[in-house]
Image (cartoon, coloured by chain):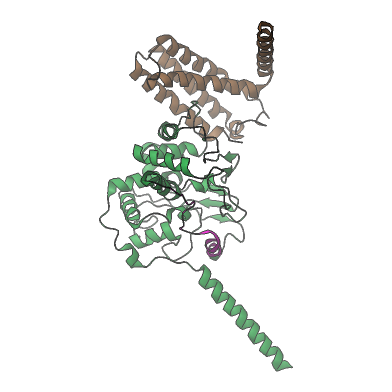
């Protein structure tokens, strides 16, 4: 009898062990190998700066209220409220000790596109690698080189303040298993080059969907609601939908371009909330990119 | 036909008066109307800036005057508790002094422009930029989409 029980117990332990191994295998951090990043080529700093603005780096990583040149000091320190707790934005200035000055391109690229930190740990998806995963190694290399040219800051950001179970980094592996994918957000039947460029900017570096797509209780995008708008993930109010059936449905592509350039709607209302900073970032992009974004927003499913 | 038109006109007039009456008692309606007026004024300047309308000194003056007049009294229409069913962010009441200062900043920018009237399309373009910078700065913190 005792031996039967011990056999059952042994099997039980084995099952649990196997489960743990499987769970680990399914949810462990998965960076690209060093070699993946070896062919990024010679960095193009001017293009890196465009990606800096397209990616909205300054809107989180610059100090609160920063304007002008201060927007290029990636000191971190801003608080990003969320339903899971408060994230404190890290320093990504070139400081070798508290910034990313000591990082390799592989470390930076794996943070950007795999959500894996420099020590192989999962990063929280409040850092929008779920969007940046679509960026090409060349673009990652250009951006990394540009960030290295910015002023160093010695600011040390506070650790995140998250409730249980979100404070367990391992749990991010489960989130990734459910929601992390580099697949296109929408399949566009007849996408010309301009629309595909817009898709890259909106779904990738621009990470527009991170606010403009509603999320479920686990922080994943609700399926079939790409860019449909929803509650403001950072607090009060809501974020408008930006598909052809949202409030910008009546805008022409030129209206969308003008809004991203100037912050004015066709009725001369202005951008508000977090979009104010986003618009100022987007105003740095070449007009052809803004036109591509507008074309893509006209091509996505109306929701 | 004529009677019908008169009836419609009268009805429209009554509705208009009713709306105006509501706007006078209701701070939310009043401040939203001011924002619409300011938006329309910036729009009038924007049309000139973009070359959609020819430069017109009277129109520029009227637009700047409306902006200045409205923005000087705009923050008076935010009594405690009036964020309900409006786009006003609760942050307004936490930072009333800053909110008032931002409103006054737009009014004084308009006054400065009135003092040295933009004389041509290029001047109006500059004016729209100066005035427009105020919109986002304030809406970033103090307006909510609901």
Visible in this render: residue A150?
no
Choose between B99 and A190: the one closer to the eye.
A190
Residue that appears at 47% across and 12% down = B62
Relative depth, front residue between B8 and A226: B8
Instruction: Name the quadrant of the C terminus of chain A.
Output: top right
Front position in the image: A221 or A120: A221
Name which quarter of the figure residue A281 lies in.
top left
B108, above or below A97, in the image: above
Q: Position of residue A112 (x, y in %)?
A: 41, 56
- Residue at 30% x, 49% y is A149
Does residue A250 belong to the magenta stretch? no
Q: Please state if A218 lies on the left or on the right of A50 as rendered.
A: right
* Residue lying at 30% horizontally and 47% vertically, measured from the top left: A47
Report x, y in % for residue B59: 44, 12
Residue A260 percent coordinates (x, y): 43, 35
> Please, which residue is most extreme toward the left here?
A42
Please provide percent x and percent y for residue B31: 60, 22
On the rendered structure, is B119 left or right of B61? left
Quadrant of residue A238 within the rendered picture: top right
Question: In this structure image, what is the colour of chain B?
Answer: brown
Specify start and end residues of the magenta stretch as a single range.
Answer: A171-191
Q: Chain A, which colour?
A: green
> Looking at the image, how many numbered discs can be counted on the residues?
0
Q: Is residue A9 above or below residue A119?
A: below
Is residue B70 visible in the rendered image? The answer is yes
The relative height of residue A101 versus residue B33 in the rendered view (above or below) is: below
């Amino acid at each position: 009898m005792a031996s039967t029980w011990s056999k059952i117990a042994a099997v039980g332990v084995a099952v649990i062990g196997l489960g743990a191994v499987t769970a680990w295998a399914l949810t462990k951090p998965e960076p690209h190998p060093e070699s993946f990043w070896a062919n990024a080529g010679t960095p193009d700093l001017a293009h890196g700066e465009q990606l800096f603005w397209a990616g909205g780096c300054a809107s989180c990583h610059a100090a609160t209220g920063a304007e002008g040149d201060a927007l290029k000091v990636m000191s971190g320190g801003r608080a990003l409220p969320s339903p899971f707790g408060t994230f404190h934005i890290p320093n990504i200035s070139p400081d070798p000790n508290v910034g990313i000055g000591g990082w390799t391109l592989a470390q930076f690229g794996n943070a950007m596109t795999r959500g894996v930190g420099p020590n192989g740990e999962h990063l929280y998806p409040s850092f929008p690698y779920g969007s940046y995963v679509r960026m090409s190694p060349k673009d990652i290399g250009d951006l990394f080189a540009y960030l290295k040219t910015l002023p160093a800051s010695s600011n040390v950001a506070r650790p995140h303040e998250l409730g249980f179970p979100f404070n367990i980094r391992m749990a991010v592996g489960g989130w990734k298993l459910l929601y992390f994918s580099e697949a296109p957000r929408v399949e566009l039947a007849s996408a010309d080059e301009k629309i595909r460029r817009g898709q890259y900017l909106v779904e990738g570096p621009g990470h527009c969907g991170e606010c403009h797509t509603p999320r479920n209780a686990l922080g994943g995008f609700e399926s079939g609601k790409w860019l449909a708008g929803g509650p403001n993930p950072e607090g009060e109010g809501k974020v408008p939908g930006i598909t052809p059936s949202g409030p910008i449905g009546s805008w022409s592509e030129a209206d969308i371009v003008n809004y991203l350039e100037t912050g004015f709607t066709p009725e001369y209302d202005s951008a508000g909330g977090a979009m104010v900073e986003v618009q100022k970032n987007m105003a740095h992009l070449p007009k052809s990119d803004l036109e591509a974004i507008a074309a893509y927003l006209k091509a996505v499913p109306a929701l | 036909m004529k009677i019908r038109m008169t009836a419609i006109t009268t009805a429209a007039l009554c509705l208009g008066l009713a709306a105006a009456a509501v706007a006078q008692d209701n701070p939310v309606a009043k401040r939203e109307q001011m924002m619409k007026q300011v938006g329309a004024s910036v729009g009038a300047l924007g049309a000139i800036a973009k070359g959609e309308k020819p430069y017109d000194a009277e129109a520029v003056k009227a637009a700047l005057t409306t902006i200045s007049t409205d923005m000087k009294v705009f923050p008076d229409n935010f009594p405690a508790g009036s964020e309900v069913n409006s786009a006003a962010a609760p942050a307004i009441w936490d930072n009333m002094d800053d909110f008032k200062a931002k409103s006054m900043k737009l009014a004084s920018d308009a006054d400065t422009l009135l003092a040295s009237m933009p004389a041509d399309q290029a001047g109006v373009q500059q004016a729209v930029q100066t005035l427009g910078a105020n919109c986002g700065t304030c809406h970033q913190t103090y307006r909510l989409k609901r």
